[in-house]
């Protein structure tokens, strides 16, 4: 079953995050999928081969220090893939 693509309208207000919407969406999508699969933060960190602290930074909508490598690990750990696109503004 393919997940519904999210739009910014689908992302709840995550405690007044001041970063651009893409980071909020990334954090929201990862946490949503973790919840859907019943994967705890401890389990997710193990699957990613990282610490809970690093995972918390990835899931924090106010922390913009995310790398493509971290995103790839998160996606693979959840049986997903990353899709990045640029659109005309």
Image: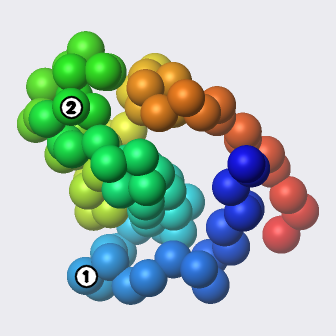
**Foreground: 60 or 31?**
31
Residue 26 is labelled as none
Q: Nearer the viewer, residue 4 or 28?
A: 4
Q: Are marks 1 and 2 in contact (CB under 8 Å)?
A: no
Q: Is residue 26 left or right of residue 61?
A: right
Total marks drawn?
2
Residue 42, quarter of picture: top left
From this viewpoint, is residue 72 visible?
A: no
Residue 13's spot in the image, x, y percent? Answer: 38, 85
Q: Residue at x 73, y 62 (%)?
A: 5
| Crowd around label 1: few <14 · some 14–19 · many ≥20 (10 Å) | few
The answer to whether residue 18 is above or below residue 40 is: below
Q: Is residue 29 left or right of residue 81?
A: left
27 over 89 or under it: above or below: above
Which residue was labeled with disc 2? 43
Q: Nearer the viewer, residue 3 or 73?
A: 3
Q: Find the distance from the CA under tag 1 to the CA under tag 2.
A: 25 Å
In the picture of the structure, the residue carrying the numbered disc 1 is 15
Q: Indicate left or right for 10 with 50 as reference.
A: right
Residue at 30 percent across and 21 percent down: it is 47
At a point 32% along the width and 62% down the height, the residue shown is 61
Using the image, determine if residue 70 lies above or below residue 22.
Answer: above
Q: Position of residue 68 (x, y in %)?
A: 50, 28
Taking 60 as reference, is 85 above or below it? above
Question: Where does residue 79 sit, x and y in percent of width and height?
Answer: 55, 29
Mark 1 vs mark 2: in front: 2
Element assignment for label 2? helix
Residue 40 lies in quadrant: top left
Percent coordinates x, y for residue 75 in the rendering = 51, 32
Task: Return the disc, 1 or 2, that comes first in the chain's sequence.
Answer: 1
> Residue at horizontal 72%, vertical 39%?
83
Farthest right residue in view: 88
């Amino acid at each position: 079953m393919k997940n519904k693509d999210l739009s910014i309208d689908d992302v709840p207000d995550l405690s007044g995050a001041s970063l651009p919407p893409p980071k909020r969406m990334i954090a929201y999508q990862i946490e949503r999928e973790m919840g859907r699969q019943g994967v705890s933060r401890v389990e997710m960190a193990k699957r990613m081969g990282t610490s809970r602290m690093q995972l918390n930074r990835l899931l924090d909508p106010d922390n913009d220090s995310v790398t493509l490598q971290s995103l790839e690990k998160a996606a693979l750990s959840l049986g997903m893939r990353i899709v990045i696109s640029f659109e005309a503004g």
